[in-house]
Amino acid sequence: MDIKQIAAILLVGHLISGLFILLVLHRQRQLFKQPIVPEAVVFRKVLFGIALVIFLGNFLPIIIDVLTIVAQDSLQREDSPSTINIFYSISNAMVAITSSIFIWLLYRLAGRTARTTEENIIIALEKK
């Protein structure tokens, strides 16, 4: 496997991670417009911060991957990187993908929990 193929695989991984984080940031933008209980404000801000760090952290690897694919000669890189570098890069991409999916799942779970809590409050108020 040459360096361009490896870079293409890594690029796909970083783009998947970026997509999930964009979904989280979009959802967070919607949530910031809604009222929230004071206890959840810090939790929401921490999740937003984590999502933002992961999103920004994907920029440099994406740039490196794209440059490796389109401009390998001008970067003066080896055609076949060391095995340790390959595994390190793949590991980083997998961590980015996994963490972005878990944060996305947290938002989905939080959304379901919020709806359930609101429904329970409405039911409790109707019983009174």
Image: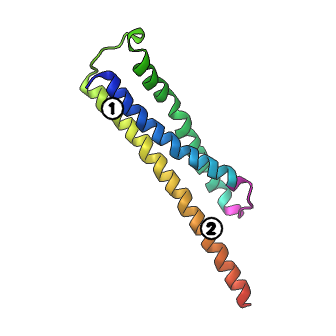
Which quadrant of the figure contains the N terminus? top left
Quadrant of residue 31 in the image?
A: bottom right
Picture coordinates of residue 119, whole percent (x, y): 65, 77
On the picture, is 37 further left or further right than 72?
right
Q: Residue at x 47, y 42 (%)?
A: 17
Residue type for callout 2: Ala
Instruction: For the C terminus, give its image quadrant.
Output: bottom right
Q: Which residues are magenta?
A: 31-39
Q: Are marks 1 and 2 in contact (CB under 8 Å)?
A: no
Spot occupied by residue 72 in the image (x, y as percentages of width and height) = 39, 14
- Residue bearing the label numbered 1: 88
* Percent x, y of residue 79: 29, 16
* Disc 1, SS: helix
104 or 16: nearer the viewer: 16
Magenta span includes 87: no
State which tag comes first along the sequence, 1 or 2.
1
Rendered residue at 68%/49% (across/down)? 29
At x 40%, y 21%, the residue is 69
Residue projecting furthest to the bottom: 128
List the residue tagged with mark 2. 114
Residue 104 placement (x, y as % from top left)? 52, 52
Q: Residues within 10 Å of mark 2 (few under 14, many from 20)?
A: few
Number of numbered discs on residues: 2
**Outermost residue to the front:** 70
Using the image, determine if residue 38 lies above or below residue 124. above
Q: Callout 2: helix, strand or loop?
A: helix
Q: CA distance from mark 1 to mark 2?
A: 39 Å
Q: How many residues crowd around disc 1 within 10 Å: few (fewer than 14), some, or many (20 or more)? A: few
Q: Amino acid at mark 1?
A: Tyr
Residue 97: give its label: none
